């Protein structure tokens, strides 16, 4: 693996400030913080965390590239999948996007929905980062027609009043602060972060509270076999509460999540004994999640079985589960590609479009590592999952 270049002097100073804030929190907590709290501070500390500060995150100049950044074909397929549910949700339907990224998804999805006759009454973006919100606003103001732009709004929190529509999130659940556990001699311990003699962040193990013990016990009962001693991984035990919060007052509507991860039995394989935690910086993956706090993304893969349990527990009916490749191909990728090629300026542009489609669907790229899962209540989303059903794995 090639060595990453050192951050700029300004970036290093910013990271040092973030590090000091976390060090102070560790000291104030008696010398130890649960890992999920470290992750929360590193990613979301106001004005300092990775997602709260001003560094570029998405695209070639950032640290990673999401599917909407790769190609507008992705948003076109999501629009095809969700358009029937939006129509069924009625005249006042809302499209709620969780975490708008750079605004690339909304910029491509809204015109696609308009072409399908399924433009929602409002397109709401729930975006906690003031910096990202500003970038989204600038991008959409530059790309959308005024009558479409007028439907876009930004939220500080979920929609609490009753509403109908759809919820969409791409690469959001993987960035939720996640507790880490370790199995030692039949006991469940929680991974904490402490400081060594030189003030560096290091792992430590502490007795797990009753909630984490229960979550890990329930997890093990649902697995094919026991996990070995010393096994370390993550369990997003707060996912049901997060799901209830983000859907808010949704009455009739559909939920669609696309992310990287596994069904539970694949996630918690005995040989995956250090979990799935990793960090991204400048398009490189690193396992050192303590390096450069505030300058790198920290993520864990998604347990899609847990997503299914949380959504069904919130009162929604399971719609389907498949790979991203199957989802996109089953929701009009080929037709979207042909339509885009027909509008392309030259053969070079056509070639670029075909390359984008390959990146989105090839197993060696995003096609199999990312999965789509959907849920419905009072509307229909089943037809979006007719190709490549993987629900037997959940």
Image: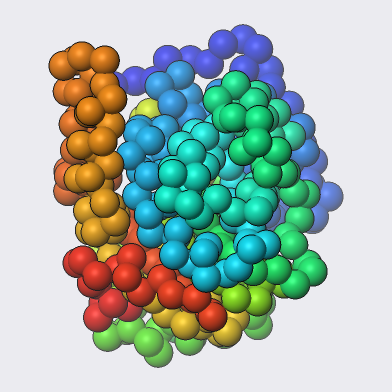
Between residues 336 and 276, which one lies in front from this camera angle? Answer: 336
Residue 66, image x, y percentages:
41, 38
In the image, taking residue 180 as reference, residue 18 lies left or right, namely right
Residue 206, image x, y percentages:
61, 67
Q: Tell me the residue at 38%/35% (across/down).
A: 72
The picture quadrant where one finds residue 84 is: bottom left
Indicate whether 193 appears above or below 158: above
Between residues 135 and 270, which one lies in front from this camera angle? Answer: 135
Residue 83, image x, y percentages:
45, 58
Between residues 268 and 326, which one lies in front from this camera angle? Answer: 326
Colour mapping used in the image:
rainbow
* Quadrant that contains the N terminus: top left
Indicate whether 374 appears above or below 144: below
Farthest-out residue, bottom = 221
The picture quadrant where one finds residue 201 is: top right
Q: Tell me the residue at 57%/84% (across/down).
A: 315
* Quadrant that contains the C terminus: bottom left
Indicate whether 142 appears above or below 210: above
Between residues 62 and 345, which one lies in front from this camera angle? Answer: 345
Residue 282, image x, y percentages:
43, 25
Farthest-out residue, right = 28
**Residue 364 appearing in the image:** yes
Q: Tell me the residue at 61%/38% (across/down).
A: 148
**Residue 369 appearing in the image:** no
Q: Tell me the residue at 24%/70% (across/down).
A: 386
């Amino acid at each position: 693996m090639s060595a990453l270049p050192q951050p700029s002097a300004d970036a290093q100073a910013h990271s040092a400030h973030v590090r000091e804030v976390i060090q102070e929190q560790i000291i104030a907590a008696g010398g130890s913080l649960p890992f999920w709290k470290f992750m929360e501070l590193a990613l979301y500390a106001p004005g300092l965390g990775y997602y709260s500060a001003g560094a570029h995150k998405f695209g070639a100049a950032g640290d990673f590239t999401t599917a909407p950044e790769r190609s507008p074909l992705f948003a076109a397929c999501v629009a095809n999948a969700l358009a029937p549910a939006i129509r069924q949700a009625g005249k006042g339907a809302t499209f709620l996007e969780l975490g708008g990224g750079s605004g690339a998804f909304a910029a491509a999805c809204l015109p696609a929905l308009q072409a399908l006759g399924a433009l929602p009454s409002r397109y709401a973006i729930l975006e906690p980062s003031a910096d990202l919100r500003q970038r989204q606003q600038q991008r959409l103001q530059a790309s959308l027609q005024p009558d479409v732009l007028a439907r876009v709004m930004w939220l500080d929190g979920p929609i609490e009043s009753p509403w109908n529509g759809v919820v969409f999130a791409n690469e959001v659940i993987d960035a939720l602060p996640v507790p880490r556990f370790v199995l030692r001699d039949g006991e469940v311990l929680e991974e904490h972060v402490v400081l060594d003699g030189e003030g560096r962040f290091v792992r430590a193990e502490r007795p797990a509270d009753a909630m984490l013990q229960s979550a890990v016990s329930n997890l093990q009962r649902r697995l094919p076999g026991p996990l070995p001693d010393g096994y370390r991984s993550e369990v997003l035990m707060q996912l049901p509460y997060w799901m209830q919060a983000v859907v808010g007052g949704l009455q009739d509507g559909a939920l669609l999540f696309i992310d990287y991860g596994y069904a539970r039995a694949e996630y918690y394989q005995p040989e995956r004994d250090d979990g799935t935690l990793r960090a991204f910086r400048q398009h490189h993956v690193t396992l050192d999640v303590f390096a450069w706090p505030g300058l790198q993304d920290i993520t864990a893969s998604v347990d899609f079985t847990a997503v299914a349990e949380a959504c069904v527990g919130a009162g929604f009916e399971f719609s389907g589960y498949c790979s991203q490749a199957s989802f996109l191909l089953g929701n009009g990728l080929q037709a979207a590609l042909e339509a885009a090629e027909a509008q392309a300026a030259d053969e070079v542009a056509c070639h670029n479009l075909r390359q984008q489609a390959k990146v989105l669907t090839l197993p060696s790229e995003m096609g199999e590592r990312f999965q789509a899962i959907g849920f419905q209540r009072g509307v229909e989303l089943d037809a979006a999952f007719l190709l490549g059903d993987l629900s037997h794995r959940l």
